[in-house]
Amino acid sequence: MLPLIQKDTRVSRSPIGGIREKFQNWLRLIFSDRNSKNLFLFLILNLSFAFVELFYGVWTNSLGLISDAFHMFFDCTGLVAGLAASLVSKWRANERFSYGYARAEVLAGFVNGLFLLFISFFIMKEAVERAIEPPEVKHERLLVVSILGFLVNLIGIYAFHHGHGHGHGGHGHSHGGHGHSHNHNSHGHSHDDMEAPTGAGSAIMRGVFLHVLADTLGSVGVIISAILMQTFGWMRADPICSMAIALLIAGSVFPLVMDSGGVLMQRTPESLERALPNLYTRVMGLAGVHSVQDPHFWTLCSDIHIGAIKLEVAREVDPRYITEQAARIFREVGVKHLTVQLDYSPL
């Protein structure tokens, strides 16, 4: 008897259909959050006008406009990195990434900052050469485009300053911060439950706001140089404006590179450095605690701090009480996750 052959009724999806479905899911995720929606919409506006500025900069031979266009392009990379980080940071923790993906924000900021420092160096080098031998700039075509660029940046300042002040980019939750301890011979460990990283979105928005603010000041510089060239024929105004833009780029991103680099290097958070000695004293004030050893504190992302300490304690102490009180003390200064190891003193 021949085997019965059944027709496969399953609908196979084409690769294009799968890509379209993923793109629609990304759009839904982007527009579900106010901060990510503002990032996406301003990214489209900024990218479109960057091409306009670049075209007019080449047409008018204006380094100021070309450098401002490249600044806008790299602002777009910052917007893309911020948008990607705001989405990736919402992914849940898993076995491979036990802390989740919140540090995508820090990595994106560090890489983007390095690119911006490179382009500011390039603009400064070119501006110095043009200041020595200033070329002819068609300034009569420059003013209108530079004013339009200034208006585009004003839209960004309004959107991101408003979002920074009022939008929170999602909701976090906590499980009450309960601690638990396990005794293994002479050691005990406590893990304080960590809240969801709600600070990621606000840090991204602060970084984007600083970029757009620097770009706005750069547009102001282009407008001033265009007026000076048109009124007084001072051609060196264009490279001087470019130098100012380069300094603005470097000045806006250097703190971002230093901060994000410090986070990636597991630096002790600056906001905790002064408070830590007093916190150690308070912990040693707990009954039965003799000393605090091997303290380690670092930043996961934004305002999410993590720590680990070892406490030498008397054998008669209640380990649950010690670990919960230590977690409570450090939670007051923003340490959301604290690992406490108890070493019992010999008899």
Image (spheres, rainbow, N blue to C red):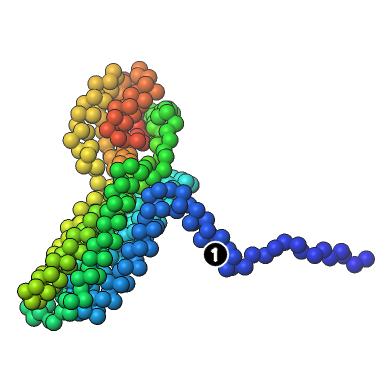
Position of residue 267 in the picture relative to residue 242 (left or right): right
Tell me which corner region of the image, top left, top right, bottom left or bottom right, holds residue 219: bottom left
Question: Where does residue 316 sit, x and y in percent of width and height?
Answer: 35, 17
Q: Amino acid at mark 1?
A: Ile
Where is 168 relative to 129, above or below? above
Along the line of sight, which residue is nearer the eye, 176 or 151? 151
Q: Residue at x 29, y 76 (%)?
A: 55
Note whether residue 116 is visible.
Answer: no
Where is 159 relative to 341, above or below? below
Question: Where does residue 136 sit, x and y in percent of width and height?
Answer: 13, 82
Where is 75 relative to 205, above or below? below
Q: Which residue is mark 1?
A: 19
Position of residue 143 in the picture relative to residue 170 (left or right): left
- Quadrant of image for the N terminus: bottom right
Q: Residue at x 24, y 54 (%)?
A: 210
Along the line of sight, which residue is nearer the eye, 320 or 273? 273
- Quadrant of image for the C terminus: top left
Question: Where does residue 53 sit, x and y in percent of width and height?
Answer: 27, 71
Tell me which corner region of the image, top left, top right, bottom left or bottom right, holds residue 330: top left
Along the line of sight, which residue is nearer the eye, 110 or 326? 110
